[in-house]
Amino acid sequence: MANKLKVKEPVPTKKEPAKEELENKSGIFDPEGELVVDVYETDASFVVLAAIAGVLIKDMDISIEKDMMVIKGNRGDPHDGEKKYFHQECYWGPFSRKIVLPENIDIGRAEAQMEKGLLTIKIPKNDGDGKEKIGVTVS
């Protein structure tokens, strides 16, 4: 069973599909952006840092199941309507990222914070090495 951090399911936005989306009706290669993250550890925590400017908390979903964290969301285009781009680098629409987690963490104490467009997820490390001893009895 996945543990959820305090973030709600993305709210679908109604927009016209792009030409590429119309040409690809199979759904196999639907475009989805990949979230860029920094992942590091401190003495006390495992930390995931992501710049997610323009995304509302209600449009994000962060879940942890076993050794995998999944961050999903939707970055709505602030300038709806017809546009003729000269150059476009900003990704608008759904995005996701899967991150493999180490074994020595306590996902029950995970915390997520969003400040100034920067998402910080901290997962404290377990006090021990994550291993348990199994006693053997003689019969």
Image (cartoon, rainbow, N blue to C red):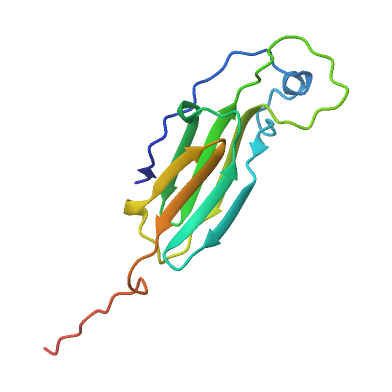
Residue visible at 57% across and 28% down? 74
> In the displayed structure, would residue 13 be above or below residue 66?
above
Residue visible at 45% across and 57% down? 67
Q: Quadrant of the C terminus?
A: bottom left
Front residue of this view, candidates 24 and 61: 61
* Tag count: 0
Left or right of residue 137: residue 57: right
Front residue of this view, candidates 130 and 79: 79
Residue extending farthest bottom: 138
Residue visible at 55% across and 49% down? 49
Left or right of residue 54: residue 86: right
Picture coordinates of residue 135, whole percent (x, y): 20, 82
> In the displayed structure, would residue 112 be above or below residue 107?
above
Front residue of this view, candidates 34 and 85: 85
Picture coordinates of residue 106, whole percent (x, y): 35, 59
Picture coordinates of residue 25, whole percent (x, y): 69, 22
Picture coordinates of residue 4, whole percent (x, y): 37, 41
